[in-house]
Image (spheres, rainbow, N blue to C red):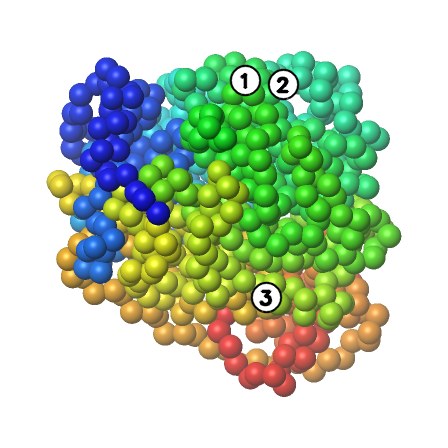
Amino acid sequence: MSRIRPAAMSLGLLLALGHAPAVVAIPGPGAAAAVDGARIIHADQHPGEWLTYGRTYSEQRFSPLAQINDRNVGRLGLAWYYDIGGGRRVQESTPLVVGGVMYLTTAWSRVIALDAATGKQLWVFHPHVPRSADAHGCCGVANRGVAIWRGRVYVGTYDGRLIALSAKTGKPLWSVRTADYTKGYTITGAPIVVQGRVIIGNGGGEFGTRGYITAYDARTGREDWRFYTVPGKPGVADHAASDRVLDRIARPTWHGRYWKFGGGGNVWDSMAYDPKLDLLYVGTGNGAPWNGTVRSPGANLFITSILALRPQTGEYVWHFQEVPDDIWDYDADQQMILADLNLHGTVRRVLMQAPKDGIFYVLDRATGRFLSGKPYTQINWARGLTSRGKPIESRKALYDVTGKPTLAMPGAAGGHNWQPMSYDPATGLVYFPVSAMAFTYAGARRVTMRKLGWNTGDDFIALPENPQAVAQIRKTLTGSLVAWNPVTQRAAWRVALGAPWNGGVVSTAGDLVFEGDAMGRFCAYRATDGKRLWSVETHTGIVAPPITYEVDGQQYVAVEIGWGGAFALAAGQLALDSQINEGNVPRMLVFTLGGAKAMPPPPPRPHLTLDPPPITAGAATIALGEARYQSFCSVCHGDSAVSGGVLPDLRYAPALANPGLWRRIVSGGLLRSGGMVSFATELSPRESGAIREYVISRANQTKGQRATRPY
């Protein structure tokens, strides 16, 4: 495969951009004052910086830097590292680098500024997110990054605030409440700033929320507009930018009393912007609840869709729905990449996405017209797509409220989730992590909306009670790094990684692709053929995407390590089978050519003795405990009382031997400071005690298999 050399590519890009401002180096924290729309649009004139979440508004995550390349990458070594700490392991941040300063986020929405050449800490901002917020959200208290604009750093916090900080000092300048975590809303995604507006969405599709996206004045924090992605209660006005289009297009696709369940459609991650078309692109999440029989019959616009909006007003321009009446949690929040492709002899402005449903989509980004779509992984929920991009659903993957389990591919974790992908305009390939993970769905016969715990309308007991399904799912637990040709809709190459749920990707003009994996390896691959050229053992699984930047003529590659997220938290033993990182210690690691710093060793692996009290409860009590555990506890402590290695494994909990201590934790909120809130409003004393008896039974089942294992 031929490749355009970096110098020629940069020259062509400069000519295409026309009269762009000259490059001006502004070292130190003051450089952030120069970041505005023009600087981001002309990001390739500042190749040493990483100015926004995807480096450019197009979200290509491709760097023109080539000092580190396929010929010398073997000389890469550790330049510095920074221990993150903070009490949680999962780290998902894309750091930004401006003027030699790195701005990164961590779990619990902390923001840290570091000297990008040395790792010296410049400042730390702690938003003091209430630990109780952990119980109101999905998939861990991670944060994926900040936005920078005219000397300010913007962060969305897990408990629903949007905060502006001084880039020089980290001092807060303003803060607005954009979502209410007590109602199931959380923020984990990075904001984007367009035309002086900070734009942020939220998550909560598993908690009965109604999705929306909001734009705020970057200087004052005043709300400019809000767009709801699904209709609310009929007759109740939102006074929002979405009012007209929801009434005209979306509401006719909803039926019944859907608003009682929230509706979903949350914009919890990806956004992109085309300055020439002046269009902001946002992806929307699953319907709430998952089970469409409970939620509403119909397509349910705009769940699992891509929307194009005007960034000044929030005006609707077009939409494309990937999975009408989504019942599998197939969000369309995954990263969208904007590029120009030669399709059948015509150069088209396209939007590309590899969402959770397992199909790679190419759309005309001016009109939303479907151009092509092919599966990038094994799927069984659809037999293909129509000429307009609508799925031809397979009956064998459908389910309702009858309770009959159905195995679907991909599962709820997706064939590709939030972990960012990269497009290299020289190779014409899109690089992204792919997982093959099935999931068993079964509709719940009774649905009660809860303030704590997931509201999916699904029966989470269906999987553990079906050994055959568990065995089938285990066979699907594979992961790979894929180089996808969006023109031919075929994989150019694949690298097997041995496990699902791996890290995001960056590609460079040095003919390299960097990615970390669940096993704790950070690797460089040749972009043209996927040959692994360099790797290092970090002793900690990686889900965050790397970046590359330059300071004083020296190129660096950085990645935040710390494994976790939806699959790690909820999948229990399936997650443990898929990753063997040794310590899961969150760090920022930064590499450069000739780096000579020793990698920090893994910490000693703590072991706990599995010594549960004997089983004394009857089968009915244990069955009740299993039902309540799967509904309220499994999404954090693991399916079937087997932790995925992120939060404590309750089979080893000392409180199993102490019913009074168990009650004080589960119902009294004894450990609320660590995020374990009281469930007294959701669980009766009998139900709380039944959960303990169920965990005791699971611990005794495990005891004969192995006597010890780490948290």
**Could one spot residue 700 in this view of the protein?**
yes
Other residues around mark 2 within 10 Å, as few (<14) / some (14–19) / many (≥20)? many
Q: Secondary structure at mark 2?
A: loop
Q: Secondary structure at mark 3?
A: helix
**Distance from Cα at disc 1 to Cα at disc 3:** 42 Å
Other residues around mark 1 within 10 Å, as few (<14) / some (14–19) / many (≥20)? many
* Residue 44 in the figure: left or right of residue 408: left
**Could one spot residue 323 in this view of the protein?**
no
Question: To which residue does mark 2 refer?
Answer: 242
Q: Secondary structure at mark 1?
A: loop
Outermost residue, front direction?
345
| Amino acid type for the residue under numbered disc 1 | Gly
Q: Tell which circle, 2 or 1, labels the residue nearer the N-terminal end.
A: 2
Q: Tell which circle, 1 or 3, labels the residue nearer the N-terminal end.
A: 1
Q: Nearer the viewer, residue 256 or 634?
A: 256
Q: Residue at x 36, y 31 (%)?
A: 56
| Amino acid type for the residue under numbered disc 2 | Ser
Q: Nearer the viewer, residue 651 or 639?
A: 639
* Residue 510 tag number: none
* Residue 688 in the figure: left or right of residue 635: right
| Amino acid type for the residue under numbered disc 3 | Leu
Q: Residue at x 46, y 56 (%)?
A: 494
Whether label 2 touches label 1, CB < 8 Å: yes
Question: To which residue does mark 3 refer?
Answer: 574
